Image (cartoon, helix red, strand yellow):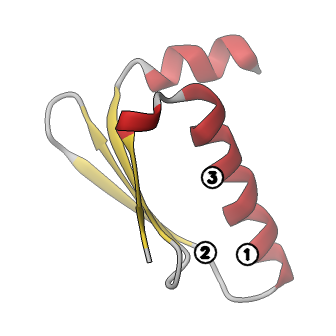
Amino acid sequence: MDDLMEHLVEYIEHAFIHISTRRIVIRDEEGYTEEYRYDFDEKGMESYSDMVNLLQDFLEPDELTFVF
């Protein structure tokens, strides 16, 4: 898993983590963005939390923006 994530994050330039809307926007090195939305239920909370933790583990702090 770690090798896969390290390979994938090579392409991520920045991640915008929108706390109040459970939304994550990923911008790649070419400037394209992809948006991920998570439901406001237990499964959505768990998936959102897991993704935020993975991004924090594999990206540098200056590659993350938390939006409240």
Task: Give the image quarter of residue 55.
Answer: top right
Q: Which residue is mark 2?
A: 38
| CA distance for labels 2 and 3 | 11 Å
Mark 1 neighbour density, 10 Å: few (under 14) some (14–19) many (20 or more): some
Q: Which residue is mark 1?
A: 44
| CA distance for labels 1 and 3 | 12 Å
Vertical comparison of 53 with 16: above or below: above
> What residue lies at 37% left-to-right and 36% top-to-bottom?
63
Is tag 1's residue or tag 3's residue first in the polypeptide sequence?
A: 1
Q: Which residue is mark 3?
A: 52
Question: Secondary structure under badge 3?
Answer: helix
Left or right of 53 in this view: 32 = left
What residue type is disc 3 on? Val
Is tag 2's residue or tag 3's residue first in the polypeptide sequence?
A: 2
CB atoms at circles 2 and 1 under 8 Å apart?
yes
Question: Quick one: quadrant of the C terminus?
Answer: bottom left
Question: Secondary structure under badge 2?
Answer: loop
